[in-house]
Amino acid sequence: MIDPAKMKRQEMKMLNRKLLEISGVLNVESFDSEEFLLETECGFLMIKGQNLHIKNLSLDQGLVAIEGTINELAYVDGNSPEKSKGFLGKLFK
């Protein structure tokens, strides 16, 4: 049986594609006005949009709030060559 205390947990709340609040964030890997790459409890999360910026950031609590026009949310899976290439490209940018 899985110990609930050891389970990874992440919550996302989006309001009208303009405000995204995410919990379970471990690190902000990279960001600019069109793309964020976050390391989360559930894997690397890519957020794409326009005029994106951080509204709130508390890595101690694992919370990030991003404002702007949000167009896409995707977990980057290291098993996919296309996604992996994009992820590695971001790391070595």
Image (cartoon, grey):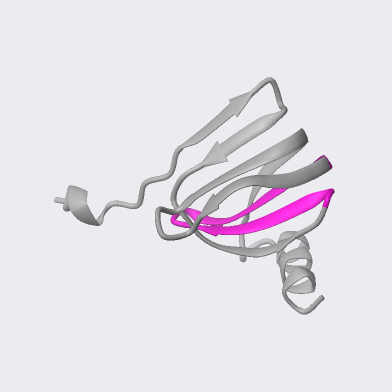
Q: Main secondary structure of the magenta part?
A: strand
As drawn, is 46 to the left or to the right of 39?
right
**Residue range (magenta):** 33-50
- For this orientation, the residue located farthest to the bottom is 92
Residue 45 image position (x, y, % from top left): 61, 52
Mark yes or no: residue 38 visible: yes
Question: Is 6 rendered above or below residue 16?
Answer: below
Which quarter shows the C terminus? bottom right
Question: Is 52 rendered above or below residue 90?
Answer: above
Q: Residue at x 40, y 53 (%)?
A: 61
- Quarter of the image for residue 86 reads bottom right
As drawn, is 63 to the left or to the right of 76?
left
Q: Residue at x 72, y 54 (%)?
A: 36
Q: Is residue 34 magenta?
A: yes
Q: Residue at x 78, y 61 (%)?
A: 82
Residue 57 image position (x, y, % from top left): 56, 52
